């Protein structure tokens, strides 16, 4: 099954973390591949690292929009390594029950990875595993091949009240 | 902060679970109060029970719509116990950083708990803790007092393809 968590609201990543916990609790094997999550310590990382049956990889820890000295070319190069990891998983005899591709929608939106190539890889991965892709701005071509798509839609956000990121909630 | 995960799409509960994991990873103390989650084993329960700093309570395990021999009165009675737990937390000197009220929107929608009384309790709880309330059909009065509201909106769902609940994904 191909699952997409997209939209401008909160809950795309936390829902994916919840899904990891649910899947591990059923005794399943899970792989988490994160992009653009390097600037601060996220609470979930500490807990997830303690759990067995979870393989965790992080690439392109900084997004060019957030960090000035990261170029577009550097982001492309680092996202390429993430794509290589996906190819490795496709050709491996090891099987994951669930694969989470965190913020890959952003990498697609910003043209760090090729849409056609990514979709072909996701199709291959989904033959052996459930695949969850997160990030706002999921492209229509990806939505077309997905089985379950949820838009996390912002109805009200504390940022609009002037509050900033809160420990334990946003990270 | 008062946070609401609502809408007809997937991710309300899994996002709350992700939030628990994030919060515990930051060393925070968390309380999870679940309604209507008794029919099957949810993978997350096994993992969450292993983690320290989490108190877990479940009330009204069966919803009258799902189980024929549960009456409206029985549901009201059991949801009352959940409300008693909230009152106990409000008056306790113990403090949680995060309190998750799972499916309480459903209890409000179905009139198992009183909206005014619940809102007053949530306001009290939110003075000491962040409070997350999940479930579809969040009432407008609750949305009005919330700081962060996300609608999990179904764009595409595998149920519409005839697929039913899948282990590790829905439970």
Image: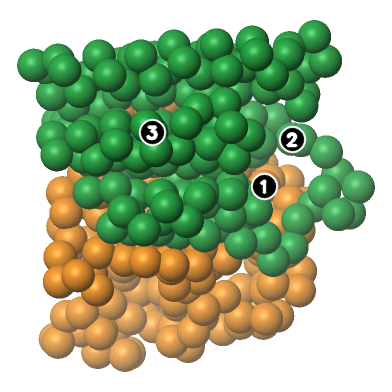
Chain colours: A orange, B green
Residue B116, which numbered label? none
Q: Are marks 1 and 2 on the same chain?
A: no
Query: Which residue: 59% across, 32% down?
Result: B111
Query: Which residue: 48% across, 23% down?
Result: B34
Left or right position of B146 against B17: left
Q: How much space separates mark 1 and mark 3, taking CA atoms?
A: 38 Å
Does residue A71 appear in this view? yes
Left or right position of A17 against B74: left
Q: Nearer the viewer, residue B145 or A135?
A: B145
Q: Nearer the viewer, residue B131 or A102?
A: B131
User: Circle 1 sits on which residue?
Assistant: A130
Q: Dot 1: few (<14), some (14–19), or many (≥20) neighbours within 10 Å?
A: some
Chain where mark 1 sits: A
Does residue A80 appear in this view? no
Chain where mark 3 sits: B
Secondary structure beneath dot 1 equals strand
Residue B118, which numbered label? 3
Q: Earlier in the sequence, mark 3 or mark 2?
A: 3
Q: Residue A64 in the image: x percent, y percent? A: 25, 84
Chain where mark 2 sits: B
Secondary structure beneath dot 3 equals helix
Q: Residue A105 in the image: x percent, y percent? A: 51, 73
Secondary structure beneath dot 2 equals loop
Q: Is residue A69 above or below residue B104?
A: below
Are the residues at dot 1 and dot 2 in contact (C-beta closer than 8 Å)? yes
Q: Residue B113 in the image: x percent, y percent? A: 50, 27
User: Circle 2 sits on which residue?
Assistant: B166
Left or right position of B104 against B160: left
Q: Is residue B106 above or below residue A122?
A: above
Residue B167 sits in quarter = top right
Q: Nearer the viewer, residue A105 or B13?
A: B13
């Amino acid at each position: 099954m191909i699952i997409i968590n997209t939209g401008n609201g909160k809950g795309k990543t936390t829902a994916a973390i919840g899904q990891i916990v649910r899947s591990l609790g059923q005794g399943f094997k899970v792989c988490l591949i994160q992009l653009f999550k390097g600037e601060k310590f996220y609470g979930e990382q500490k807990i997830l690292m303690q759990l067995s049956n979870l393989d965790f990889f992080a690439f392109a820890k900084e997004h060019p929009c957030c960090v000035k000295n990261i170029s577009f070319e550097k982001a492309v190069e680092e996202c390429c390594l993430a794509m290589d990891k996906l190819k490795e998983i496709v050709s491996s005899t090891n099987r994951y029950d669930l694969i989470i591709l965190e913020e890959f929608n952003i990498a697609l939106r910003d043209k760090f990875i090729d849409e056609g190539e990514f979709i072909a890889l996701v199709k291959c991965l989904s033959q052996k595993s459930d695949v969850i892709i997160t990030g706002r701005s999921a492209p229509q071509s990806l939505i077309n091949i997905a089985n379950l798509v949820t838009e996390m839609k912002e109805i009200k956000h504390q940022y609009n009240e002037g509050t900033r990121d809160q420990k334990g909630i946003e990270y």
